[in-house]
Amino acid sequence: MPWTDCIAYFFGGAVLTNAVPHFVSGVMGRPFQSPFAKPRGQGHSSSTVNVLWGFLNLVIGYLLVIRVGDFDLRSTADVVALGLGTLLMGVMMARMFGRFNGGNFPVDG
């Protein structure tokens, strides 16, 4: 498998992960942070904006995973690349959105 396919699957996993909170918050009718809010990424965007942003992320993720190369769920390399993109984006989003939504708690040391 070409390394460019691995890169596409990695970013596909990241973009698909980014789609989840935006789309879900939007269809629940809740405002959520988005790149279109003021301040950017910190303020809330409307539920409609989040549905549209989440859907666009789904389309881009689909294109990166399904239309680039020949993604195979039985290929360890393909799944690892997708999984690493998903995991990395998930952790980054948990830390970023947790600041605004009560998800980050201090750890006693």
Image (cartoon, rainbow, N blue to C red):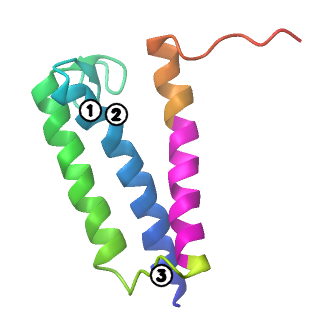
Residue appearing at x 17%, y 29% in the figure: 27
**Cα gap from disc 2 to disc 3, whole angstroms:** 27 Å
Of callouts 3 and 1, the N-terminal one: 3
What is the magenta segment's predominant secondary structure?
A: helix
Contact between marks 2 and 1 (CB within 8 A): the answer is: yes
Crowding near the residue tagged with mark 2, few <14, some 14–19, many ≥20 C-alpha atoms within 10 Å: some
Q: Which residues are magenta?
A: 78-92
The answer to which quarter of the image holds residue 25 is top left
Q: How many marks?
A: 3
Q: Position of residue 56 (x, y in %)?
A: 19, 51
Q: Amino acid at mark 3?
A: Thr
- Label number found at residue 4: 3
Q: Nearer the viewer, residue 40 or 34?
A: 34
Question: Residue 35: in sight, yes or no?
Answer: no
- Residue position for label 2: 21
Residue appearing at x 13%, y 40% in the figure: 52
User: Relative to 27, is 24 on the left or the right?
Assistant: right
Q: Quadrant of the C terminus?
A: top right
Q: Quick one: which residue is furthest to the front in this view?
A: 74
Of callouts 2 and 3, the N-terminal one: 3
Q: Give the structural element (helix, strand or loop) at label 2.
A: helix
- Look at the picture and state if 9 lies above or below 55: below
- Label number found at residue 81: none
Crowding near the residue tagged with mark 3, few <14, some 14–19, many ≥20 C-alpha atoms within 10 Å: few
- Look at the picture and state if 101 lies above or below 40: above
**Cα gap from disc 2 to disc 1, whole angstroms:** 5 Å
Q: Residue 82 magenta-drawn?
A: yes
- Label number found at residue 24: 1
- Look at the picture and state if 45 lies above or below 109: below
Q: Give the structural element (helix, strand or loop) at label 3.
A: helix
Question: Residue 15: in sight, yes or no?
Answer: yes
